[in-house]
Amino acid sequence: MSRPALDATALSESVRAGETTVAAIADAFLEHIETLEPDIHAFASFKPRQVRLQAALNEGHGLLAGVPVGLKDILDSADHPTQFFSPIYTDHQPSRDAHVVTLLRQAGALIMGKTHTTEFAYMRTGPTRNPHDLERTPGSSSAGSAAGMAADFFAVALGTQTAGSLLKPASYCGLFAFKPSFGLVSLEGVKPLAPSFDTVGWYGRSVRDLNLMARVLIPGFKVPEIEQRPLRLGFYRTARWDQVAPDVANALEEAVEHLRGAGHQVSEIQLPEAFAGVFDDHLLINDCEGARSLAKEFQAHRALLSPSILAMFDRAAATTWEQESAAKARLTALAPILNEICQPFDAMLGPCCGSVAPLFVDSAENTGPSDYIKFWGAFGWPQVNLPLPRAEGLLPIGLQVIGRFRNDGSLLRVAERVAAELLTDRGH
């Protein structure tokens, strides 16, 4: 059997229908991984024998029957170490799975291994390369999961996002990705960084895969039917549009014009000047909460922390509790204003990243800014990355589709329609 060229939805359906076996799927993916992994370095822990053992015991039932999954290495798993890309936790073996990992297993998924992250899901990058160009970064802390997806090492993968760590790698690697509304997915067994923003999300090969994973990881999740009328979409460039590279800006504007040409209403919106401070307030809160989350590592193993982590502690130490509280209060005050402005729209559109994947420099923090992503994440809103159609040889660019808080099901339905307009008959 060759490696299945199917999305997770079709793959699980083929297993349940008896058209293939979990063991055959495992063998096909393992063969592919063993060929390409020496160049990609997606895995922090990879145990082929463990994968085959899982496959032999897998009964081929559940929403994710036989679907290979990658796990970001800040999520605990009982059969792989969780090391956070830090020497402090070399060979650290949790005693049980994170809540979301248990849900994946209960749904019939096949855990392929743990994927590389940045140090404590923050800044210092790991060894993973972008499959589209090995000289370029795959993105920030969910990089191993994204690169593994782009290299076809698994059919879906888990990541997390605090600022831009899920959607940025999706944009750089040409993937579908979904970051749910804050608080919908359990964080039990996930190493925290900034608890005000930390969210588990996932990658897939289609919007329907994103929906499939939501049904597994968000109990009671439903995607509502929406009226078959032209979509009403808002396009927000943010206050930092001047930092978007021309090729990215052109691709986004072409996508907007294509949607308009298909009969959908896309209106540009402007936000009050106060929203220009969201980027800095997110960073301030991230620093302060990150310093508290890593306090035990800082006190016991300061010499083993990277300069970027130590710089975060310095910024946090220079920030008063009153300043942090004021930043949180500003976001709280802006949230209902943003909701009211966006209320008339089915979803918002915007840039995901300001550039294509930057060149990889070993051990550098060179993954590019996350501003266009963390703007919406500061309010806990759900976010989708859609890979835009690109000519052969050009690096991926992502379109961000954003829904209002707790409108996750509606967002996925809108994203499905937008993807159908932009990607049908274009090689996706």
Image (cartoon, helix red, strand yellow):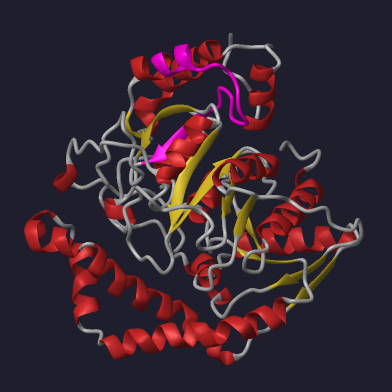
| Image spot of residue 424 (x, y percent) | 80, 41
Residue 63 lies in the magenta-colored region: yes
Q: Quadrant of residue 135?
A: top left
Q: Report the side of 337 relative to 89 (left or right).
A: right
Residue pictured at 82% horizontal, 59% vertical: 259
Residue pictured at 53% horizontal, 61% vertical: 353
Q: Report the side of 170 relative to 271 (left or right).
A: left
- Which residues fall within the magenta stretch? 53-72
Using the rendered image of the protein, determine whether residue 133 is visible from the camera's viewpoint: no
| Image spot of residue 185 (x, y percent) | 50, 53
| Image spot of residue 346 (x, y percent) | 77, 66
Q: How many marks?
A: 0
Which of these two is toward me, 58 or 67? 58
Q: Report the side of 424 relative to 122 (left or right).
A: right
Residue pictured at 18% horizontal, 66% vertical: 310
Tell me the quarter of the image containing the C terminus.
top right
Is 48 drawn above or below residue 316 in the view shown? above
Which of these two is toward me, 218 or 408? 218
Tell me the quarter of the image containing the N terminus.
top right
Is 427 drawn above or below residue 218 in the view shown? above
| Image spot of residue 283 (x, y percent) | 38, 74
